[in-house]
Image (cartoon, helix red, strand yellow):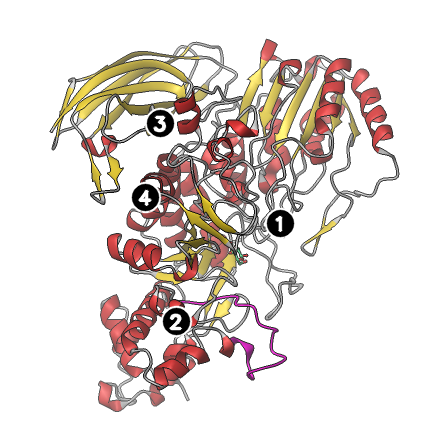
Amino acid sequence: MGIWSLLPIACGTSAGDRQLPPYLDESVSLEERIEDAMKRMTLEEKIAVLHAQSKFSSRGVPRLGIPELWCTDGPHGIRAEGAWDEWRQAGWTNDSCTAFPALTCLTATWNPAMSALYGRSIGEEARYRDKDVLLGPGVNIYRTPLNGRNFEYMGEDPYLASRMVVPYVQEVQKNGVAACVKHFALNNQESSRHTTDVDVDDRALYEIYLPAFRAAVQEGGAWSVMGSYNLYRGEHGCHNRRLLCDILKGEWGFDGAVISDWGGTHNTEQAIANGLDLEFGTWTNGLSSGAKNAYDSYHLAFPYLDLLRRGVVSESDLDDKVRRVLRLNFRTAMNTRKPFGSLNSPEHLMAARQIACEGIVLLKNEGEILPINPSGVKKIAVIGENAVKMMTVGGGSSSLKARYECSPLEGIVKAVGDRVDVIYERGYIGGLSPMSDGVVAGYDLSESRTADELLVDALTAARTADVVLFFGGLNKNSHQDCEDSDRLSLSLPYDQDRLIRELAQVNRNLVVVNISGNAVSMPWIAEVPAVVQGWYLGSEAGYALSDVLFGKVNPSGKLPFTFPVHLEDNGAHATNSYMPGPGVNRYAEGLFVGYRWHEKQGVAPLFAFGHGLSYTTFEISDVRMDRDRLTKSGSLHLTARLTNTGERSGSEVVQLYIGDEKSSLPRPVKELKGFEKVTLNPGEERTVNFIITPDDLKYYDDEKHAWVVEPGRFTAHVGVSSADIRGTVAFYYDA
Ligand code: BGC
């Protein structure tokens, strides 16, 4: 007996002619289908769709054939299948995925086409694994380099993050899989993430912390958003009236579902009234005690039903939530036209490698030590634990079970073949466990040598080599780049600074590859000729790194955040307003985040936002505008000529920043308002075009609660990083 026979005849369905009821008929509009389904649902069925039924799924309406919703992390690959009620993996053998580079690397490509490729590929993997909601991407702004989760986000600049998040969301959703943009909002640190209460002024909120979410919702059309763990103005992000009701659903017109972060719901009344739609992960003790099914104890389960039955709350909030969850369901699980997806296809692996190659950033290359010509060297010493440690595992919820991960050491050995002798020394111990999140790292990390012995062995290897490649940085252990804890300092852990300094003493041909999703201090920078930012690169890590180190690929990545020299050079730390403990955390630096702070204070960074070198050279010339006056409804056309003046083909990112010379409220010296990545052959040149409109000049006036633009003089800065401006043009805005 199918569901047809259960449908009420009164709703126009006859079992005889099997005419589809409106909610199942895809030729009927989405909103009519939702209303039709709503009419057929009992109160209990409505409640049942608003909360989890397992760690990662929620109930549909079985009686009506409305399927369950299945979520998955996100955001760098499709997480291994978990047990129904526990965090451990279920032990399936068909759930290993392609690990894509971390979102910091994606953002470092400064190439929205890479973001589209990423979204399309990960969306296809989600589909193949039959997931409906991908828990990502994350766009929390990089406020402090200590934040353990920065590697999952898109950097410090709201414009860059906005441009990069939109194609990711759009392409994921073309697969009939919802993106769930997280963590809304102000989840800028991991320490005390459930108890930190952010106090931020409205200018910083609207200008810095919200734009990427808004772009994901309004331009990307995101179907779901995840509330954050932290509090804002005394209410948790998962039931925060201002963030969810006033801004997200009110000002931005978001029509999708707000999903709680796992365990982020704390209060039934607030969850009902303040914008939460779908509750996941509220801590219960499984199925063992209390109500028959512990999920029934969730705030949006029996406690909500009880308040409704007693008439304490009305059904209007309920219907709004159910509508939103059904909308999410109809767009994903109920969509019968979605593609089937694919897993670990050669195209996905190629996409992972291409994104990794484009995101790697060449930070320093003195004496052009890079790229290494394999036929010019006989022996390469590879030093450092990160040359062998699997980085697709660990770090918290983004941990993956990748079908394979090519380590840097493997990539190098494969790239140079038998021609070159590659010797490996670990140099330091970052971790001894070969196991993380149920995945066994491919390399034996046990160690019997002392730290001093490891150092001596590393130096011995380095002395005899033609070139030394050091792979260090952070890892995905607690207090490194890892969820639920922040870093304890800007320094490299495990005494790596000492090791790097000593390596530089014994061999001048030293290349440091920093594997991390965060800035680190480099007190040895003057002693090391070449430094590469290697991120967490996913399945193809080793191949991508060797492509760049040996010059198969000319690097073109650009930093999505500033590397400060000292921690105190960062705005949150300079103002002493990074608070790892619980309580009210006032963001005293306001909107001066990242390069905005450095420029305001005149503090030079170690490496500036937007910085990244190439094996060729570029020149920017002829920066000009068609006119010098912009009016309310007009636009200006800015052009700049980019020339490849070196001997290799390569890509450069031309960056446009705009500064307001005088304004009623304080403003940053300049802010990113446009960028374009251009690939040129040696000697080739191209004109890059930017259109400037009044929107690019606006700031958020917190008194008026509006975006305003003031008449006056502005400057357009065109360059290759926030600190390397090659041309400027002044212009005026006339109201
Ligand atoms: C994380 C989310 C994640 C969820 C499910 C939470 O702890 O903050 O980002 O999607 O777990 O794994």
Q: Amino acid at mark 4?
A: Asp
Does 431 sit left or right of 683 as displayed?
Answer: right
Q: Mark 4 packing: few (<14 Cα in 10 Å), some, or many (20+)?
A: some
Of tags 2 and 1, the one toward the viewer is: 2
Left or right of 115? Residue 286 is right
| Residue designated by label 1 | 402
Residue in the picture at 36% in, 47% down: 213
For disc 4, the marked residue is: 202
The x and y percentages for residue 269 are: 39, 71
Q: Which mark is on residue 269? A: 2
Percent x, y of residue 122:
48, 49
Residue range corresponding to the magenta coloring: 278-295
- C-alpha span from label 2 to label 3: 47 Å
Does the segment drawn in magenta span residue 188? no
- Dot 4 beta carbon under 8 Å from ligand 1: no
Say which element carries label 1: loop
Going from N to C along the chain, the mark reached first, 4 or 2, is: 4
The correct choice, above or below, for 707 with respect to 618 in the image is below
Q: Is residue 20 visible?
A: no
Crowding near the residue tagged with mark 1, few <14, some 14–19, many ≥20 C-alpha atoms within 10 Å: many
Q: Can you identify the residue that label 3 sits on?
A: 676
Residues under labels 4 and 2: Cα distance? Answer: 26 Å
Dots 2, 3 in contact, CB < 8 A? no
